[in-house]
Image (spheres, helix red, strand yellow):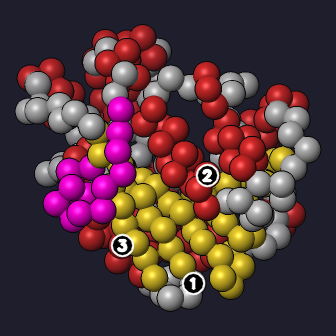
Amino acid sequence: MLEKKFEEIHDEGVKFAYKFASDFVKDKTVLDFGCGGGYGTEYLSRFTNLNVTGFDIDKKTIGINREYYKNKNLQFESEKDRLGKYDVITSFQVIEHIKERNVDNLLSNIKKHLKDDGLFLCATPNKLVTSNDLKKPVMVFHEKEYSPSEFKEKLDRLFLKVLIYGQRRSVDEGNISRREEIVRRLSQIEVVRLISRHLPMAIKYLLMGDPKKIEEMTYRLVDDQKEIDKSFILIAACYSRK
């Protein structure tokens, strides 16, 4: 999703967490850790006059972001030693791409850049919905997905107060279709996972379903545990102070 404005992203699911975060960034400095194409970072920069930084280890992506987004309070970095301390840090759809043994270290490093009274917002897929009963995530680029309890337990090790919310699809999809079940089972075969990493998106859509159906979905924020367990995405608000 390079060189796209927030409004040009049609999938409401990938925009939801940034809309949630926008309520917390007024008059705050912000770090978007693992910013990717930068559309969410740019969006957050509209809600504060202070510095907003997008960080990603992909130098090529950061270079493209710097050329495309020109907000005065917005910058992009690919070097960790150039990052400072921030009031709010966001990290959306990142930790599931990290090997489990490295996640605690990643979160500790993120916390080092958070001010003592700061807020860390983190979002990740809910294993109970996306890959329940499977040994490996269906999405081949995901290393580890977390249930709500696993997600909270991991964050509780670093933060004094952790609130878990759910990004729930407004309309339940119902039972898994036969095609989806076949894809789920195939995703557990290592050779299939290796091949699928290199498939064109058109073929992936053919296997996974119509992208227009995904784009038309709407979402709501939930805080009831039963609703959270059924949510597609988990969102955590983490505070260093109670």
Q: Are marks 1 and 3 in contact (CB under 8 Å)?
A: no
Q: Nearer the viewer, residue 65 or 104?
A: 65
Q: What residue span does the magenta drawing correspond to?
A: 218-233
Dot 2, crowdedness within 10 Å: few (<14), some or many (≥20)? Answer: some
* Mark with earlier residue (2, 3): 2
* Mark with earlier residue (2, 1): 2
Q: Write down the residue under mark 2.
A: 22
Q: Amino acid at mark 2?
A: Ser
Q: Is residue 17 visible?
A: yes
Q: Is residue 229 magenta?
A: yes
The image shows residue 28 at horizontal and vertical percentages of: 75, 65
Res. 144 image quadrant: bottom left
Q: Amino acid at mark 3?
A: Lys
Q: CA distance from mark 2 to mark 1?
A: 20 Å
Q: CA distance from mark 1 to mark 3?
A: 14 Å
**Residue positioned 68% across, 41% down in the render:** 43
Q: Are marks 2 and 1 in contact (CB under 8 Å)?
A: no
Q: Nearer the viewer, residue 70 or 183?
A: 70
Res. 61 image quadrant: top right
The image shows residue 106 at horizontal and vertical percentages of: 58, 68
Q: Nearer the viewer, residue 3 or 8?
A: 8
Q: Write down the residue under mark 1.
A: 240
The image shows residue 20 at horizontal and vertical percentages of: 51, 51
**Residue positioned 65% across, 64% down in the render:** 89
User: Looking at the image, is mark 2 or mark 3 nearer the viewer?
Assistant: 2
Q: Is residue 112 visible?
A: no
Q: Write down the residue under mark 3.
A: 152
**Is 206 located above or below residue 158 in the figure?**
above
Dot 1, crowdedness within 10 Å: few (<14), some or many (≥20)? Answer: some
